[in-house]
Amino acid sequence: MGHHRMVRTPSLPKPALALLVSIPLGLGSVACARKGDPIPRPRTEAQACLARWEGFRLLEVTLPALDIKGNSLVGLESVRVYHLPLGSSRPSPGEVLAKGEVVLEQRRPDLPSPGRTFRMDLEGIGRPAGWIVVAALRTGNVVGSPSATLPWLHPAL
């Protein structure tokens, strides 16, 4: 009855054991080093672009420099032109934006900085007479306020 079995456990040198214990602790501190909101705040709409006809199908667009809360505009992704066919009266910019179709979109990197002016060539847009507005989009597909409603003449003219 005097037989005892000795169970042998593997042992690591003390420096290796200290390293294995410190790795999970170090990873935990790296993950907790982030500051600020864990969920990014949604972007606010951009203010309206300024749009005016420079030629028959050449639109001059000035990008907004601020969002609707008056903060600097960052995260601008694209500019869209919306078209709405003629109706009984001139629609509001919001109506063209809500009911119209996107007929042209210009994206980064082909956009200037906020507050700068560029031109959009609408020569190839074959839509009937109607109305257009221009709106800037921010990251997250946040559509900005629309520009003033501009007339779109019939392509045969």
Image: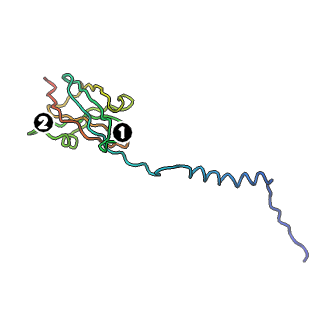
Q: Residue at x 51, y 49 (%)?
A: 35
Instruction: For mark 2, give the secondary structure.
Output: loop
How busy is the neighbourhood of tag 1: few (under 14 within 10 Å), some, or many (20 plus)? few
Q: How is the image coloured?
A: rainbow
Of residues 72 and 24, the one drawn nearer to the viewer in this rendering: 72
Q: Residue at x 85, y 67 (%)?
A: 6
Instruction: For mark 1, give the secondary structure.
Output: loop
Of residues 80 and 42, the one drawn nearer to the viewer in this rendering: 42
* Front position among marks 2 and 1: 1
Q: Is residue 59 left or right of residue 35?
A: left
Q: Residue at x 29, y 41 (%)?
A: 144
Residue highlighted by disc 1: 72
Which residue reaches farthest front? 70
Q: Residue 34 at what x, y percent from top left?
A: 53, 49
Query: Of callouts 2 and 1, which one flags the residue occurring earlier in the amino acid sequence?
Result: 1
User: Which of the image's four quarters has the C terminus?
Assistant: top left
Mark 1 and mark 2 in contact (Cβ < 8 Å)?
Answer: no
Of residues 44 and 119, the one drawn nearer to the viewer in this rendering: 44
Give the total of numbered labels. Answer: 2
Image quarter of residue 148: top left
Q: Residue 80 at what x, y percent from top left?
A: 28, 35
User: Which of the image's four quarters has the N terminus?
Assistant: bottom right
Image quarter of residue 133: top left
Which residue reaches farthest left? 88
* C-alpha separation, residue under disc 2 versus residue under disc 1: 36 Å
Q: Which mark is residue 86?
A: 2
Q: Is residue 130 left or right of residue 41?
A: left
In the rendered structure, which amino acid carries the disc numbered 2? Leu
How busy is the neighbourhood of tag 2: few (under 14 within 10 Å), some, or many (20 plus)? some
In the rendered structure, which amino acid carries the disc numbered 1? Ser
